[in-house]
Image (tube, rainbow, N blue to C red):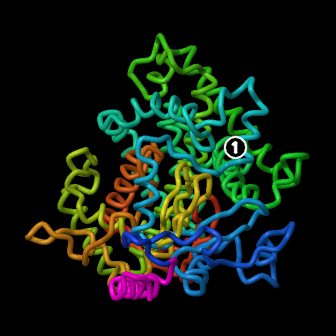
Amino acid sequence: MCSRGKLCGRKETILKLCAQSYSINPCRADGIVEPKPFENIPGPKSLPLIGTLYKYLPFIGEYNFTKLHTNGLMKLKRYGPLVREEIVPGQQVVWVFRPEDIAEIFKAEAGLHPKRRSHLALLKYRKDRSKVYNTGGLLPTNGIEWWKLRREFQKVLSKPRNVVDYLEDTNAVVQEFVQLCSREKPDDFLPLLSRLFLELTCLVAFDVKMRSLSEEEKNPHSRSSRLIEAAFVTNSVILKLDNGPRLWRFFETPLYRKLRKAQNYMEEVALEMVTQRNQDLLICRKQSLLEEYLKNEVLDIKDIVGMACDMLLAGIDTTTYSTSFALYHLAKNISVQEKLRSEASALLTDPMSPITAETLKNATYTKAVIKETFRLNPISVGIGRILQTDVVLSGYRVPKETVVVTQNQVICRLPEYFDEPNSFKPERWLRDSNDKLREKSVNPYTVLPFGHGPRSCIARRFAEQNMQVVLLRLCRNLQFTWSGESLDSISLLINKPDAPIKLRFKNLHA
């Protein structure tokens, strides 16, 4: 015992209790808990030269690149709410499962330009084609270069009036789609949904009608068919190119060749459309988004072509797959479908009534259905960031430049965050008469389908508007049931249904 006697012994006891309580390094003399070092974060064992890629090998590995949410749940149960992994040798990735930690990640980037490590091969492709693109575009670019682009495009896309201006054309396209649903009985409705959302995306990206739902455009060699295929191929190979050994940096691999050919076609169409609209600028009768971009002196055609390609890449599959999951849940839960139909009938007194901005403003149950769809089947497994400052997560100090990926697809189905987490209950997002959510308190960082902050989806308003119109119009005019297997998702860049969309429609007004 030292000369301070009992006081010293008491402090020593406090320090020991503090260390036991947190299971981390002992408290400092001032009582502040020291974060544990980054190297102590648990996770799969990494091997020299191959990292943890061996765990993803077909037939022998325990993980699967096409089931990231299943991998995530396994890692959560085995290692806890923070997992460190080195899939690519030399590249540390931290999987984040606690909403509180997710909040810390986004707080740390306040005032900074959010950075992420994704679409790496797409970035190389565009940088190699400086005659077509000024930058890598909004998807793969970081830093001030990204922010300059985002700021200019956001000025137009964030205006509610600009979004509402496309409602009339959207109504017409969706009406045609509903008629096809009542007539056709394909084994898989996914291709028809892809055509619908290609048409709606091109209205915004190019201000043109592609006639994607017409019979002649269903030919596999048509422009519509080739654009849909190009978007699908790109979204299918991006994650593999990002997470593999990245040999494409040195020579053209078969996977990179697929990306190159798909992007070649998308940019060919974008160049043609943007150039034509630029030539017709003086004789256009209405102001479109594309025209506003073309009149912006900060942007040139190369920037606009890149943006158009990004919208095609992100717009077609995102809304196609999300709407597929929504229709699946509605077909499997007839009582929910009937509630949505009641709302649609109240808002659209006539089956052919136009859907207006006021209609969508009052479509509260429709919005709840979409939000519940995003909880059960989000667009991606989570959100990726490159930390720009040290952050403490779950008691560990995670250094700057570390790649972190939130695991929202996993946590959205955990009972500690949602009652009956595997049930489709749109009511959980509605407010009661006391203006409180019916669900127990929901952490706002659990469900983030469109990302968060400045880097969130720039076309979110269009995506939500299009989905709302489709669900309202379908439920107002048709009943539908599910005749397929239970759906899960395949982890591509955008989560895709892992089985055909087998729906059976019945016309309510035949």
Residue range corresponding to the magenta coloring: 1-25
The one nearer the camera, 55 or 185, is 55
- In what element is the residue under mark 1? loop
Residue on which the image places disc 1 = 222
Is residue 14 covered in magenta?
yes
330 displayed left or right of 68: left
Magenta: main secondary structure equals helix
Going by the numbered disc 1, the residue's amino acid type is Ser
- Residue 272 pos. (x, y %): 66, 26
Q: How many marks?
A: 1
- Residue 240 pos. (x, y %): 74, 60
Q: Is residue 499 visible?
A: no
412 displayed left or right of 91: left
> Which residue extends farthest front?
3
The residue located at (50%, 69%) in the rendering is 35
- Residue 172 pos. (x, y %): 39, 44
